Amino acid sequence: MAVAALSHITQSGMAQTPALVSTARRYARRYATVSPHPVTGNNQHKVVIVGAGTAGLSVSHQLLRSGQFAEKDIAVIDPAKWHHYQPGWTLAAGGLRNKDEFKSLLADQIDPKLKFYHDSASTFSPADNTVTLSNGDKLTYDQLIVAPGIKTDFTSIKGLPEALADPSAPVSSVYRYDTCDKAFRTVSAFKSGQALFTQPVGVVKCAGAPQKVMWLSWDYWRRNGLYSTSDPSSSPIKITFATGLPVMFGVPKYSAVLDELRKQRGVEGLFEHDLLRIDSGNKATFRKPSGEEVTRHFDLLHAVPKMGPHGFIKNSPLADESGYVSVDTSTLQHKIYPNVWALGDAASLPTSKTAAAITAQAPVVVTNVLRCIAGKENWDQYDGYTSCPLTVGEKKVLLAEFKYGGEPKETFGQMFGIDQGVPRRAFYHLKKDFFPWVYRNYMVKGMWGGPKGVIRGRVGV
Ligand code: UQ1
C-alpha cells in the first residue's frame, strides 16, 4: 500500500469541486452518447479496452463471456509483444521459480473473437468517443475501458540504468523482466558486506515487493550460514532496508508485524530515506523529507525506481491532477465522461496496485459497463479490496488483504477464523504455486474472481 498514493487522490479530489464536476458531466452527456450505435465501420466497436495486461485481459474476456457481444464488438489495444505475470518476478528474485515460466506471447492470450489492435493508443477524444492509435487510425466506441498500467521510470534514479546494465555491478531490480533474475544472481554470489534494499516515496506496483526481495535474500543467506538472526552483528552480511515511507507497510496491522520481524532479524531500518542516485564506488544517496542528503556505502543493492502514469494518460482529458484516470473510487466510472471506465494501476484508486485488486475491480467494471449499455444506472461497487502476499522467508507468507482505509478484509480469516497477520506455510504455497497456476488457467481467461473463487457463470448478467 503506497502511503503517498493516498495523498495524490486527496489532492485531486479537492481540486475538482462538485459544481464543476456536474457542469462537466452535463456537457459530456450532450457530446458523449452512451446509447449503443450500430457497429458498422471497421473501426467502430461497442467496447474499446486500452491495455491487455492483467486488468485488460480479465475485463475483455469477462465481457466476451457475458454472451452479449458479437465477434469484434469488443476491441483491445496493446503494443506489447509479451505478456508477463509480474507477481512471479519476486519469486524469480528469490530463486524459487524461473522467470520464463511467467512469460507468454500477448497475441496468444487474446481470444480471436476480440479485435486486437497491436499498437499503442496515443490520444483520447472522449467528447467524440474516439481513441487514436499511434499509426493514426481512429477507433470509436460506445464504452471505453482504460487499463494501460503505469510506467516504471528507471531514469528517476541517477546511475541506476547504467548499474543495472553492468553485469559486474551488484545492483538489481525486481521491477523489470531482464533484471529480476539478476537479483538472485547477485544475492547468491554475495558472501559478505553491506546489503541495501530500497523503496521509493510515492506510488509503486505491489508496495510489498521491495521488502519481499529482502526477506527472500535474508532467508538465502541464513540457510547458507552467512547471516545469523541470533547474532546479526557478528554475521558477515549486514542488511538495511531504506524506504521513503515512514513505516514498513501502509496498513498498520501488517506494518506492526513486519517491523517486529525486522527488529527480530537485526535488519536496520532507514525510514523516510528516498533513493536519489547511485555513484561510482557503490555509493547510494538518499533524500530525507527535510531535504537533507544521506550517503551510504553498499556492497549489494536492490533498487526500486519511481513509477507513475504513462504520458498519453497524464496528458489526456481523462486524467486528474496527478495524471491518473479520474474515476469514482466505488463505481470505477469516469468522473466526467459516463461511458468511460478505468481499473488497474492507471486508475485514480487509493488502494494498493496488485493483480489481486483486479480480481475485485474487473467484475465491477464489467457489470457496470453492461448496465450502462442497457441504460441502467444502478452501479455495482468496489470496496478497495487488494492483497499483498508477503514472502517473509522460512517458506512462509504473510497474506495481507485489505480494503479502502487500510482496513483488513481477510478471506481465510472470515472463512476459518485465522489471523492473517501471522505468516503461514499454506499461504506460501498459495503464492508460489496456486496463484501463478490460477492466473494462467483462469484469470486471464476471465474466469477468476479472487477470494470469490472460479467464475462459473457470466459476470454482470
Ligand atoms: C488472487 O486471486 C490472485 O490472483 C491470481 C493473486 O495473485 C497475484 C493474489 O495475490 C491474491 C491474494 C488473490 C486473492 C485470492 C484469494 C484466494 C485470497
Image (cartoon, rainbow, N blue to C red):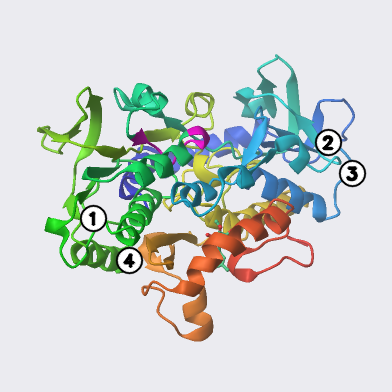
Q: How many marks?
A: 4
Residue 107 position (above or below residue 387): above
Residue 62 position (above or below residue 274): below
> Quick check: can you spot residue 377?
no
Kindly identify which numbered label has been placed on residue 247.
Answer: 1
Magenta-colored stretch includes residue 172 = yes
Residue type at tag 1: Val
Does any atom of ligand 1 lie closer than 8 Å to the CB of label 3?
Answer: no
Instruction: Residue 5 in the image: state x and y as whole percent.
Output: 36, 45
Instruction: Residue 358 in the image: state x and y as whole percent.
Output: 58, 53
Q: Earlier in the sequence, mark 4 or mark 3?
A: 3
Residue type at tag 4: Tyr
At numbered mark 3, what does the secondary structure look like: helix, strand or loop?
Answer: loop
Residue type at tag 2: His
Of badges 4 and 3, nearer the viewer stands: 4
The answer to whether residue 123 is left or right of residue 275 is right
